[in-house]
Image (cartoon, helix red, strand yellow):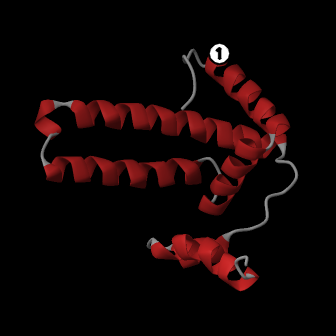
Amino acid sequence: MGVRPRHRLLALLLPALAFPGGARALQAQEPPPATVTVEQMTAYARAYIATGELRDSIHAQLAQPRNKTVEAQQHLRERMRERTAQIVQEHGLTDVAWRRITFVISTDTAQRKVFDEIVAGLTAREGRGGGG
């Protein structure tokens, strides 16, 4: 005897609804497009590089002895969340677009190749060692 389709759907939805904002995230999802434009991918790649640099900086600060208190750790993590959202917005992307492009490059090898080439070009041109 198999699992009924309605129960299968519930089993898939319940984990998403269990975390704060889960219902909102499900409602806000748009079906991913087959491709992302080069302009969108370039904006995403620039934001990706900037968020990677931010993450590296915050992680280095988190490792410092003076930042080992719970308050300092929470403050730095909150600053990283706020600054990441700001970086995404500064690059002309919405949170939904950021997540959609992340999904596309994670699931479409052709799009991932385009993304990797853009990141490589940007980091070489700007003298950086790599992306996030």
Q: Looking at the picture, which amino acid does disc 1 mark?
A: Ala
Image location of residue 110, percent across then percent down: 85, 35
Comparing 43 with 48, the one in front is 48
Comparing 44 with 100, the one in front is 100
Image location of residue 75, percent across then percent down: 24, 52
Image location of residue 63, percent across then percent down: 23, 32
Number of numbered discs overlaid on the protein picture: 1
Which residue of the protein is positioned furthest toward the right in this rendering?
Answer: 34
Which residue of the protein is positioned furthest toward the front in this rendering?
Answer: 1
Q: Quadrant of residue 130?
A: top right
Asked if residue 41 is positioned above or below residue 2 in the image, the reply reads: above
Quadrant where the C terminus is found in the figure: top right
Asked if residue 81 is positioned above or below residue 65 in the image, the reply reads: below
State the SS at label 1.
helix
Image location of residue 85, percent across then percent down: 49, 54
Comparing 125 with 1, the one in front is 1
Q: Quadrant of residue 117?
A: top right
- Within 10 angstroms of label 1, few (less than 14), some, or many (20 or more) residues? few
The residue at 74%/34% (across/down) is: 115
The residue at 52%/47% (across/down) is: 87
| Residue holding disc 1 | 124
The answer to whether 50 appears left or right of 76 in the picture is right
Asked whether the viewer can see residue 35, the reply is: yes
Quadrant where the N terminus is found in the figure: bottom right
The residue at 79%/59% (across/down) is: 32
Asked if residue 72 is positioned above or below residue 127 in the image, the reply reads: below
The answer to whether 87 appears left or right of 20 in the picture is right
Asked whether the viewer can see residue 93, the reply is: no
